[in-house]
Image (cartoon, helix red, strand yellow):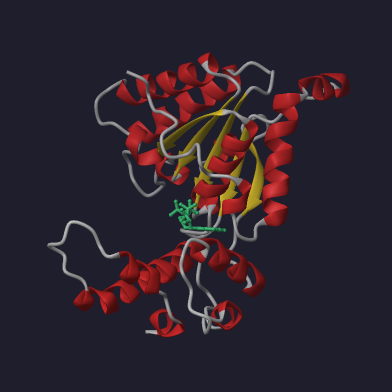
Amino acid sequence: KPVSGFEGISQVTYEDIGGLREELQRLRETIELPMRHPELFRRLGIEPPKGVLLFGPPGTGKTLIAKAVANESGAHFIPIAGPEVISKYYGESEQRLREVFDEAEDNAPAIIFIDELDSITPKREEVTGEVERRVVAQLLTMMDGLEERGEVIVIGATNRLDAIDPALRRPGRFDREIEIGVPAEPDRHDILMIHTRGMPLAEDVNLSELSARTHGYTGADLAALAREAAIRALRRYLPDIDLDEEEIPQEILEKMVVTYKDFKQ
Ligand code: ATP
């Protein structure tokens, strides 16, 4: 069976990312350039990057941006979660990592995305951490063994940069770092536009005001805000709807709108 697949990622495009322009630009340069033109790096006598770290609070779009770059560059995408690799059975974690890297090399160009990379760092205060130590060692071995053609790149994501094992951040490993922060007002506006673009918005919906009022919201928070507004709108129409009927009458579907009040409750 394949280690993982393409499900659910093939649709993510740059259009789905609100804000994060410079971050996306930097990620693209780091990933697409060596994938498409390894000769540039060869000519300069340097190795193309093998690993990139995306760091920042939860829900800010780290997974989203990685999926979009994979999709738009036509790279095979293999998402794994750090904790999923940690197995208490001897050798199983190493085996799992080998499978992931094999899949990537067989399907190159490929991007391996490791979410929660910090979870494979041995905790200093613990005497154990034995599995984590072995997983870090295996990951280093696999990254060091990657052919220097720039065709397989590992993206690691974390909320805690300081919790990443220092060995993983040395040159030739995860040596590029891109911060993905909480969005400022214009970016919140962008994100709200994206998450309401399929909704029938009433005329009173003021996304500028909404973006001004949502200081501190992440992309995930804003996506949830939009979704909840739509659910609230749906509840307003439910009393008019006979759910036993085969189909909802067209005139009801047509009059449904999401109002500004739905966003503000
Ligand atoms: P975690 O650290 O929890 O894994 P993450 O940074 O990887 O978080 P994502 O999984 O990329 O966050 O974001 C969750 C969801 O929030 C996305 O699927 C998307 O719907 C929405 N979202 C987050 N950031 C953005 C953004 N910049 N533009 C549009 N949508 C966003």
Nearer-the-camera pick, 163 or 250: 250
Q: Residue at x 46, y 24 (%)?
A: 138
Q: Residue at x 31, y 71 (%)?
A: 252
Image spot of residue 188 (x, y percent): 58, 70
Q: Residue at x 41, y 75 (%)?
A: 257
User: Given the current orientation, which residue lies at the most extreme right position?
Assistant: 43
Nearer-the-camera pick, 161 or 32: 32
Please say if 88 is above or below 258: above
Image spot of residue 137 (x, y percent): 47, 26
Quadrant location, the C terminus: bottom left
Image spot of residue 245 (x, y percent): 15, 61
Image spot of residue 72 (x, y percent): 62, 37
- Residue 229 figure quarter: bottom left
Position of residue 100 in the picture relative to residue 13 (left or right): left
Q: Residue at x 33, y 64 (%)?
A: 250
Quadrant location, the N terminus: top left
User: Given the current orientation, which residue lies at the most extreme left position?
Assistant: 244
Residue 257 visible in the snapshot: yes
Please say if 228 is above or below 123: below
Residue 182 visible in the snapshot: no
Nearer-the-camera pick, 197 or 211: 197
Position of residue 204 in the picture relative to residue 5 (left or right): right
Number of labelled discs?
0
Position of residue 149 in the picture relative to residue 201 (left or right): right
Please say if 238 is above or below 19: below
- Residue 97 figure quarter: top left
Please say if 104 is above or below 13: above
